[in-house]
Image (cartoon, grey):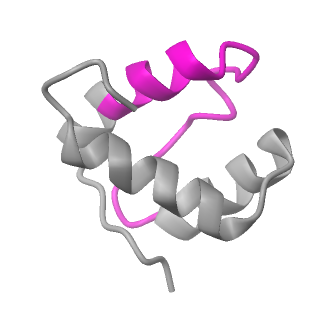
């Protein structure tokens, strides 16, 4: 089970931040629907070649600062 919950509205903003930091990610890599956090985490782990803790930390950090450019 995913350690984070992201709504579709939040994802629109968070996706832009993730895309800016990791500009090699495609729209397909960043496809997400509410409730599919686990699939998103797995996909990002594979594409970023990072462990689960890093991906979850990065997403949570982006969620904390959703109104800023900080990721």
Number of marks in the rendered image: 0
At a point 19% along the width and 22% down the height, the residue shown is: 68
Q: Main secondary structure of the magenta part?
A: loop
Give the side of residue 63 with respect to residue 49, left or right: left
Please name whichever residue, 15 or 36, is drawn nearer the observer in this view of the structure.
15
- Chain part drawn in magenta: 14-36
Q: Is residue 15 magenta?
A: yes
Look at the picture and state if 42 lies above or below 67. Answer: below
User: How far across and how far down the image is residue 53, in percent?
Assistant: 62, 68
User: How far across and how far down the image is residue 63, in percent?
Assistant: 27, 46
At a point 55% along the width and 37% down the height, the residue shown is: 31
Is residue 33 visible in the rendered image? The answer is: no
Give the side of residue 2 with respect to residue 13, left or right: right
Please name whichever residue, 19 or 64, is drawn nearer the observer in this view of the structure.
64
Give the side of residue 31 with respect to residue 11, left or right: right
Which image quarter holds the C terminus? top left
Look at the picture and state if 44 lies above or below 38. Answer: above
Is residue 16 visible in the rendered image? The answer is: yes
Q: Is residue 29 magenta?
A: yes
Residue occupying the far bottom of the picture = 1
User: Which of the 4 quarters of the picture holds residue 55?
Assistant: bottom right
At a point 70% along the width and 20% down the height, the residue shown is: 26
User: How far across and how far down the image is residue 22, in percent?
Assistant: 65, 22
Residue occupying the far front of the picture = 70
User: Which of the 4 quarters of the picture holds residue 10?
Assistant: top left
At a point 35% along the width and 48% down the height, the residue shown is: 61
């Amino acid at each position: 089970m995913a350690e984070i919950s992201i709504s579709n509205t939040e994802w629109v903003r968070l996706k832009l931040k993730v895309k800016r930091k990791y500009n090699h990610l495609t729209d397909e890599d960043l496809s997400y629907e509410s409730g599919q956090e686990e699939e998103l985490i797995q996909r990002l782990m594979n594409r970023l070649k990072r462990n689960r803790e890093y991906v979850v930390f990065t997403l949570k950090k982006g969620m904390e600062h959703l109104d800023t450019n900080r990721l």
